[in-house]
Image: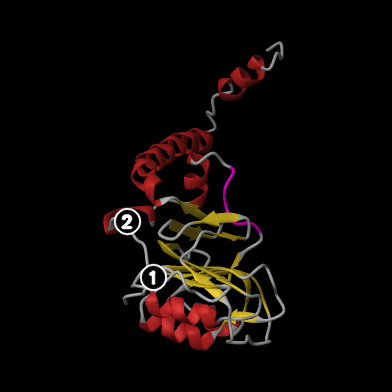
Amino acid sequence: MTVKISTEWPAGYRINPRISHIAPDDVAAFREIPVAVAGDCMGRSIGAMGLRCYNSDIKTVLCGPAITVRVRPGDNLMIHKAMLMAKPGDVIVIDGGGDLTQALVGGLMRTTALARQLGGFVIDGAIRDLVEWAEDGIAIFARGHTHRGPSKVGPGEINITIACAGLAVQPGDLILGDADGVIAVPAADVAGLLPKARAHLDKEALIRADNERGTADPERFDAVLRDKGLPL
């Protein structure tokens, strides 16, 4: 879908074009990388806080490029527009200000998302129609839920830098979500992060094997303690 870029947007409105510079092979590869591993490789200091996965399957995985949306709390007009701009696999990431008084996304929107093969949703706000979201088919993470529905009057912005539950997200970032949480990998960092994450997984596999055998090396921690001045 072509979006006309204008400098004459009304106050509070902005629609920027979809951005995606991530290779499909990289997206597929990151589906095998746990969020905790990716986060460890990115400094252990990033990630959305206070969101929960509303799918019933704890093994649900979210992975795809971000379409970002900022809305007025309780209004989902621009979310509908963003969904119609999105391509298969895209993840709709919404800054709803953490408001839980009105649901931003519900079951009818889930039907649209499934038909358009979207990758899922990450919402700093509320959803509704939980029975439908619990089904397999599309991942969703949100701050909470309520039966109260949204308005559709605006304003809102699409494909701008947002903060979603404490997570900075730029359009086109790779969004990863699983049972542990949600993070955003800057598009420029994706290719470099993948080998680091795979190496981290290999390292964890060796540690896990030692733990299972009961042969964990105490020097792993003693060396750290000696560096802190402990007489070990």
Q: Is residue 154 visible?
A: yes
**Residue 218 vertical placement versus 70 (above, below):** above
How far separated are the C-alphas under marks 1 and 2? 20 Å
The amino acid type of the residue labelled 2 equals His
Q: Quadrant where the N terminus lies?
A: bottom left
Q: Please say whether residue 197 is one of the residues in the magenta stretch.
A: no
Helix, strand or loop status at disc 2: loop
Q: Residue 198: image x %, image y %? A: 38, 42
Closer to the camera: disc 1 or disc 2?
A: 1
The amino acid type of the residue labelled 1 equals Ile
Residue that appears at 56% across and 74% down: 156
Which circle's residue, 1 or 2, is located before the other in the chain? 1
Frontmost residue, 50 versus 218: 50
**Residue 200 vertical placement versus 116 (above, below):** above
Horizontal arrangement in the rendering, residue 71 relative to residue 59 (left or right): right
Residue 21 badge:
2
Q: Quadrant of residue 119?
A: bottom left
Frontmost residue, 226 versus 160: 160
> What is the count of numbered marks?
2
Q: Please say whether residue 47 is one of the residues in the magenta stretch.
A: yes
Horizontal arrangement in the rendering, residue 68 relative to residue 97 (left or right): left
Q: Quadrant where the C terminus lies?
A: top right
Residue 124 badge:
none
Q: Quadrant of residue 166?
A: bottom right
Dot 1: few (<14), some (14–19), or many (≥20) neighbours within 10 Å? few
Magenta-drawn segment: 45-49
Q: Residue 33: image x %, image y %? A: 42, 51
Q: Is residue 56 visible?
A: no
Residue ID for mark 1 = 5
Dot 2: few (<14), some (14–19), or many (≥20) neighbours within 10 Å? few
